Image (spheres, grey):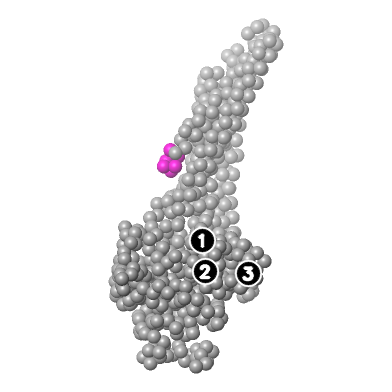
C-alpha cells in the first residue's frame, strides 16, 4: 500500500499538521475554562471575588481558539480527502489495467462478480481506511495521550484514575477486534456471491421469465442475502457490545473523579475548576477512545479489503508476452503475403482440466485461403479458433503464424493480425456506429458504411430511427440475434487484419443473407485468410477446404465434393441437412 501512499504523502503530511493544530486547540480549552471558573467566577485566589475582565478576556481567547481549531479541522478534511481519493483512483485504475491483461482462466477463477466488488466496494473500504488512518490516528492518539498528560498536570491522582481504567478499555477493544476480524473476509465473499447472482439474473432475465423461474431466483438471491445479513449482524453485534462497555467504563471514571475531587475540595487540595477541567479531559479521552474503536473497525475492514485488492494487483498474466512485433514477411509470386497459419502436432486441454480437447492437429492454412471447420458439438472447433489469437496456449506442439510461433509474438502485435466475430455477439451501450468502429478506432463514416454493407447490415441500420447513430441498449438487448451478429461481423470486417475468424457468427442469419455476406466478403478481402466455423453445410460448402473434427482429432480435410466421397462424418452431416438446405 506504501507504493500508492508515497505518491500523495505530501497531502497526508499537510493533513496531519492541520490535525495537530485542531487537537491542540481542544486540549488547551479545558485549562482556560478552569481559570474562568476558579478565578473569574468563584474568585478562589481573590477572596471569593470574581473577575469579569478575566472572564471576558479568556472567553474571547477561547472563541479565537475554537475558530482556529475549526479552520484547521476543515483544511484537514480537505487534504485527507485529497489523499484518500487520489490513492483510490490510482488503485482502481491499476486494478482495471491488470484485469485487462488476465487470461480467460484467470477471469474464471476470480469471477466477474468478485472482480466488480473488489474494484468498487473493496477499494472504497481501502480509501476509507487510509482517510481514517491519516485523520483518526493522529486525533485519537493526541486526544488520548494529551488528555492523560493534562490530567496529570492538573492533578496526578486524577491521572492515575484514568490510567487504571485503560487496561480494561484496551482489553475490550482487542477482544472485539479478534472476534470480528475473521468475519470480514467472509462478509466480502458473500457480497461477491450476491453480485454474481445479480449479474447472472439481469443478463439472463429473458430465460428466467421464459422458464418461469422467477420464484426460484428470488429464493436463491434471498438465501445469499440472508447469509450476508447474518454475517453483518454478527459483526455489528460485536461492535454494538463494545461501545456501551466503553461508555460504562468512562462513566465510572467520571464518577470516581467526582468522588475523589469532592474529598480533595473539602480538604483544600483542589478546586471546582480543576474538577471541571478533569471531567472535560475525561470526556475528550472517551471521545478519543471511541474514535479509536471506529478507527480500528475501519482498519480491520480496510486491511481485509486490501488483501482482496492486492490479489488483483499481484496477479501476473498467465500468458507471457513474447518479444516479436510481427514484422515477418513471407514472399510468394514476388509480393508480400501474410496470414499463413500452421498447426504442427497441436494438442490442447483447457487449464485445470485433464481432458484433451484437441489431439495432434496438423494443418497448414495458406494466405488468402478460406477454411471451414465442421464437427459435432464439443469436438473442439471453438478451441481451435481460440488458439490462433492466443486466448489460450497450446499444451502440445506448435502453432505458427507467418512462420513464427504465436508464443513468441507480442500479444498486441499478434491480435492486430486477427479479427474475430463470435456466435455470442458482444455489443456495448453506445451508438451502432461506435460499436462497428471498435474494429478500427477513428474509421471514417465511409469505411463504417462499407463494412456494414459487406455484413449485410445496411438495410436494418438505415431502418432504425437514428441510423448509424441509433443507441444500442445494454448487451444489445434492443436488437435481434441476427442484427447483433451483423454488427459484430461489421466490426470484424472493418478491422485491418490478415486473418478473419467467424466462430459460428452467422448462425442467426438466413441462408440468402449468409450467402450474400460470404460473396461480398470474398470480393472485398480476397487476400485475407478466412476461417469459418459453422454447423450448416450451406455455410461451408463454398470454402476452399473444409476441416472435419471428430473427438478432438482432424478426421478429414478437403473440398465439399471430396469430403462427400471420402468422409463418413461429413456425409452424415450432409444427409441430415440435405432436406432443409439443399435442393440439388
Relative image position of residue 210 (x, y in whole percent): 63, 75
Magenta region, residue range: 1-6
Q: How many marks?
A: 3
Residue hosting label 3: 462
> Residue at position x 39%, y 85% from top?
559
Residue hosting label 1: 443
Residue found at the far top of this picture: 47
For residue 432, above or below residue 375: above
Categorize mark 1 by other alpha carbons within 10 Å: few (<14), some (14-19), many (20+). some
* Nearest to the observer: residue 415 or residue 252: 415
Taking 380 as reference, is 423 left or right? Answer: right
**N-terminal of the two: label 3 or label 2?**
2
Taking 489 as reference, is 102 left or right? Answer: left
**N-terminal of the two: label 3 or label 1?**
1
> Residue at position x 59%, y 18% from top?
31
Q: Secondary structure at mark 1?
A: loop
**N-terminal of the two: label 1 or label 2?**
1
Amino acid at each position: 500500500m506504501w507504493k500508492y501512499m508515497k505518491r500523495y504523502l505530501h497531502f497526508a503530511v499537510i493533513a496531519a499538521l492541520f490535525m495537530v493544530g485542531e487537537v491542540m486547540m481542544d486540549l488547551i480549552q479545558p485549562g482556560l475554562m478552569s481559570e474562568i471558573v476558579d478565578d473569574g467566577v468563584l474568585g478562589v485566589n481573590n477572596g471569593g471575588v470574581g473577575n469579569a475582565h478575566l472572564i471576558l478576556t479568556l472567553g474571547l481567547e477561547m472563541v479565537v481558539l475554537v475558530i482556529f481549531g475549526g479552520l484547521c479541522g476543515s483544511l484537514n478534511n480537505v487534504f485527507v480527502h485529497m489523499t484518500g481519493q487520489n490513492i483510490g483512483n490510482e488503485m482502481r485504475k491499476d486494478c482495471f489495467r491488470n484485469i485487462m491483461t488476465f487470461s480467460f482462466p484467470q477471469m474464471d477463477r476470480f469471477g466477474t462478480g468478485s472482480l466488480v466488488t473488489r474494484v468498487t466496494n473493496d477499494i472504497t473500504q481501502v480509501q476509507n481506511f487510509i482517510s481514517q488512518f491519516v485523520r483518526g490516528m493522529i486525533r485519537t492518539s493526541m486526544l488520548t495521550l494529551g488528555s492523560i498528560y493534562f490530567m496529570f498536570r492538573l492533578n496526578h491522582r486524577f491521572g492515575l484514575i484514568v490510567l487504571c481504567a485503560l487496561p480494561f478499555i484496551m482489553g475490550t477493544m482487542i477482544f472485539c477486534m479478534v472476534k470480528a476480524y475473521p468475519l470480514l473476509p467472509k462478509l466480502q465473499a458473500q457480497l461477491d456471491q450476491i453480485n454474481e447472482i445479480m449479474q447472472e439474473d439481469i443478463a439472463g432475465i429473458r430465460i428466467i421469465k421464459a422458464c418461469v423461474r422467477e420464484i426460484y431466483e428470488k429464493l436463491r438471491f434471498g438465501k445469499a442475502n440472508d447469509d450476508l445479513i447474518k454475517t453483518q449482524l454478527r459483526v455489528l453485534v460485536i461492535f454494538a457490545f463494545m461501545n456501551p462497555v466503553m461508555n460504562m467504563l468512562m462513566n465510572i471514571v467520571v464518577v470516581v473523579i467526582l468522588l475523589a475531587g469532592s474529598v480533595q475540595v473539602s480538604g483544600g487540595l483542589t478546586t471546582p475548576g480543576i474538577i471541571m477541567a478533569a471531567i472535560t479531559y475525561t470526556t475528550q479521552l472517551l471521545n478519543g477512545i471511541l474514535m479509536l474503536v471506529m478507527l480500528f473497525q475501519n482498519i480491520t475492514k480496510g486491511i481485509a479489503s486490501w488483501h482482496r485488492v492486492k490479489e488483483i494487483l499481484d496477479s501476473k498474466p498467465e500468458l507471457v508476452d513474447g518479444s516479436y512485433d510481427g514484422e515477418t514477411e513471407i514472399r510468394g509470386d514476388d509480393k508480400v503475403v501474410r496470414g499463413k497459419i500452421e498447426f504442427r502436432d497441436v494438442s490442447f486441454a483447457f487449464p485445470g482440466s485433464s481432458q484433451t480437447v484437441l489431439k495432434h492437429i496438423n494443418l497448414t492454412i495458406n494466405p488468402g485461403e478460406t477454411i471451414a471447420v465442421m464437427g459435432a458439438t464439443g469436438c473442439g472447433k471453438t478451441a481451435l479458433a481460440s488458439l490462433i489469437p492466443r486466448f489460450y496456449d497450446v499444451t502440445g506442439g506448435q502453432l505458427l503464424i507467418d512462420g513464427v510461433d504465436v508464443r513468441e509474438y507480442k500479444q498486441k502485435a499478434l491480435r492486430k493480425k486477427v479479427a474475430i466475430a463470435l456466435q455470442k455477439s458482444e455489443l456495448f451501450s453506445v451508438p451502432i456506429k461506435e460499436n462497428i468502429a471498435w474494429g478500427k478506432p477513428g474509421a471514417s463514416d465511409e469505411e463504417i458504411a462499407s463494412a456494414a454493407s459487406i455484413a449485410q447490415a445496411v438495410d436494418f441500420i438505415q431502418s432504425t430511427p437514428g441510423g448509424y447513430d441509433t443507441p444500442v441498449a445494454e448487451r444489445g438487448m434492443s436488437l435481434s440475434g441476427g442484427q447483433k451478429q451483423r454488427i459484430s461481423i461489421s466490426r470484424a470486417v472493418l478491422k485491418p487484419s490478415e486473418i478473419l475468424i467467424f466462430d459460428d457468427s452467422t448462425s442467426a442469419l438466413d441462408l440468402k443473407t449468409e450467402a450474400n455476406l460470404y460473396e461480398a466478403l470474398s470480393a472485398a478481402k480476397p487476400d485475407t485468410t478466412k476461417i469459418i466455423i459453422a454447423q450448416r453445410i450451406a455455410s461451408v460448402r463454398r470454402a476452399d477446404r473444409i476441416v472435419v473434427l471428430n473427438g478432438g482429432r482432424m478426421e478429414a480435410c478437403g473440398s465439399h465434393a471430396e469430403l462427400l466421397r471420402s468422409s463418413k462424418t461429413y456425409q452424415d452431416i450432409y444427409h441430415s441437412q440435405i432436406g432443409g438446405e439443399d435442393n440439388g
